Image (cartoon, rainbow, N blue to C red):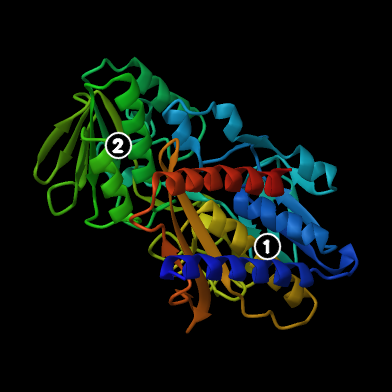
Amino acid sequence: MTRASFNRRAVLQAGAALSAVAALARPAIAQSAGRVVVVGGGFAGATCARELKRGGFNVTLVEPSATYTACPFSNGVLAGLRPLSRQQFTYDALKKDGLAVVAQRATKIDGQQKRVSLSDGTILGYDRLVLAPGIDLRFDALPGYSEDVAQIMPHAWKAGEQTSLLRSQLEAMPDGGTVIISVPANPYRCPPGPYERASLIAYYLKTQKPRAKLIVLDAKDTFSKQGLFQAAWKALYPNLEWVSMSSGGKVIEVDVGEKVLVTEFGRHKGDVVNVIPPQRAGEIAALAGATDRSGWCPIDPVTFESRQQAGIHIIGDACVAGGMPKSAFAANAQAKVCAAAIASLLGGRAPETPKLINTCYSLVAPDYGITVAGVYRPVNGVLTDVEGAGGVSPADSSAAFRSLEASHADAWFRTITDEVFG
């Protein structure tokens, strides 16, 4: 047995164990035993709300949008591989299952009184509060960039209108044009996401606009699955250039009038410019007093309870999860652990120490997938990688294996969205 296959088997075994623990943790008690409000209806929030509802709790999911647009696989929309509609999901199935879904925005959290204020003036009381607000983009962190400028230089890091805008710009660009992607320093949502985006845009250019060029300006010298991505780029996309931080890739200013990105080493002009800005936890987390100076939310890795606000739990992209990356897979796993912990806490029991898993799939081309997987457990108050339990796709994989990984990625997306959104 190779080390890679051992790692993959260990991840699968850990996943089965986690599912069993989550199922056993569901309490067979009346709804009156606990009121839980969940703010945010993405992969983390919707999963947690479902788990708690199944456990018999009085759960209210607060989410202002009627439709959720998923970020995983949205890079395929940019490459013309799938319509945006395949990324969009409603909350109808959650409502059908008896979950209360309130289409309002949470505007204030009173942790002392345990109340959530909504945009229509409604106030919801709770015994436990779960925040799953995702990310906000730090437009102020990059001189020259703003929400208005994003209509010219899209970020497309929140899927939806921005995804469609960037796609339309790529379609309109003449053959022979230049596409530039600006990648921020860590941490940000989906560590391998910008490099999958570069790969699939490069695929689109190769097949539709072969004289075009793609430049990736990076504020880092290393990134997730780097060896696998770069080997694929060398083989498939000679017109893709990656510029590391040390080589002058860190963008320090945006010149929207000239469609130029300024680095410490020079100026880069593009026909299509995709600026992915630095990020932080969604605004409601800061309003709740759950963020630290980094802009993210420190948590207890056993319960995902805020280290700054008792009775408030933070899951998904907004939390500081140690070695665990900000991904949809991670958000789903964290939500299940958090729901089990809340069930224990409201039932007067000590929560069990969890193990969590994450798998990040990336497409380099429609039939070329690569994967990184990990298992995590709390060590000294921090979620830490379990040594030897994770790994990446083998570097010497065959074309058939890469195609199989791409199929696994598609199957994962269909499975998780069906589980979460029905």
- Rendered position, 9 above or below 214: below
Residue 122 image offset from top left, x and y in percent: 74, 46
Amino acid type at image mark 1: Leu
* Residue 251 figure quarter: top left
Q: Nearer the viewer, residue 243 or 113?
A: 243
Residue 210's label in the rendered image is: none
Q: Nearer the viewer, residue 149 or 198?
A: 198
Which residue is drawn at the image coordinates 60% and 63% (left, top)? 334
Question: Which quadrant does the C terminus fall into?
Answer: top right
- Rendered position, 110 above or below 378: above
* Horizontal arrangement in the rendering, residue 137 relative to residue 417 (left or right): left
Query: In the structure shown, which secondary structural element does the residue marked by tag 2 occupy?
Result: loop
Which residue is drawn at the image coordinates 47% and 57% (left, top)? 326
Which residue is drawn at the image coordinates 65% and 40% (left, top)? 64
- Packing grade of label 2 (10 A; few <14, some 14-19, many >=20) is some
Q: CA distance from mark 2 to mark 1?
A: 34 Å
- Of label 2 and label 1, which has the lower sequence position? 1
Amino acid type at image mark 2: Tyr
- Rendered position, 286 above or below 96: below
Residue 387 image offset from top left, x and y in percent: 43, 77
* Horizontal arrangement in the rendering, residue 357 relative to residue 204 (left or right): right
Q: Which residue is mark 1?
A: 129
Q: Which residue is mark 2?
A: 145
- Packing grade of label 1 (10 A; few <14, some 14-19, many >=20) is many
Q: Nearer the viewer, residue 286 or 321?
A: 321
Residue 293 image offset from top left, x and y in percent: 38, 64
Residue 125 visible in this rendered orientation of the protein: no
Query: In the structure shown, which secondary structural element does the residue marked by tag 1 occupy?
Result: strand
Mark 2 in CB contact with mark 1 (< 8 angstroms): no
